[in-house]
Amino acid sequence: MQSGQSKSTQTITIYKAPQKGKGRKLLEEGFQPIDFPYDPPYLDGSCYFAGRNDRSIAEEFNQSYKDGILEVTIDCEIYDQYFKSLESRYDEKDNHKRIEVVIPQHLFPILNQFPRVLKTR
């Protein structure tokens, strides 16, 4: 931690490749249960993100979806409290373990408190 920087100002960014046509809606309206129903492709109703500060998984999905990458920046303390336990290993690429974060619908209100940016390139 740099001097003069408190822990509360540190953030973690997670990344989502929205399905075609959903990027702008998620950016403007946030994550809503109606957008993640309990049927394909979201069998569990959860929202899947590429883990902290590594957008490579989202980039791969965006090659198919082509709707950009949604970045959500979350305070470290809040991330550790609500989302860190939801991390799991996705796979390994280039000798780097990649993490995904699977966020259930009941945590969408917390997720929606944080800034979102849709990057199309």
Image (cartoon, helix red, strand yellow):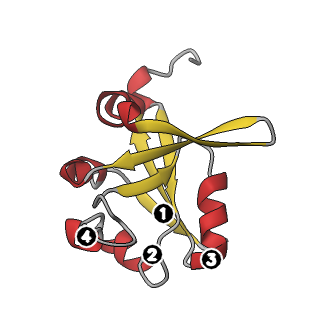
Q: On the image, numbered disc 4 is attached to which residue?
A: 37
Q: What type is the residue that disc 3 sits on? A: Ser
Report, in whole angstroms, how far the alpha carbon at label 1 lies from the one at label 3.
20 Å
Instruction: Characterize the local packing of mark 3: few (<14), some (14-19) or many (20 or more) Cα atoms within 10 angstroms.
Output: few
Question: Helix, strand or loop at disc 3?
Answer: helix
Report, in whole angstroms, how far the alpha carbon at label 1 lies from the one at label 4.
23 Å
Q: On the image, numbered disc 1 is attached to which residue?
A: 117
Which numbered marker is on residue 23? 2
Q: What type is the residue that disc 4 sits on? A: Pro
Q: At 48% from the left edge and 37% from the top edge, which residue is drawn?
A: 88
Report, in whole angstroms, how far the alpha carbon at label 1 lies from the one at label 2.
10 Å
Q: Position of residue 10 (x, y in %)?
A: 47, 31
User: Residue placed farthest to the bottom in the image?
Assistant: 21
Which of the two marks, 3 or 2, is nearer to us in this view? Answer: 3
Instruction: Characterize the local packing of mark 2: few (<14), some (14-19) or many (20 or more) Cα atoms within 10 angstroms.
Output: many
Q: Position of residue 75 (x, y in %)?
A: 39, 36
Q: At 51% from the left edge and 18% from the top edge, which residue is drawn?
A: 4
Quadrant for residue 43, please give it: bottom left
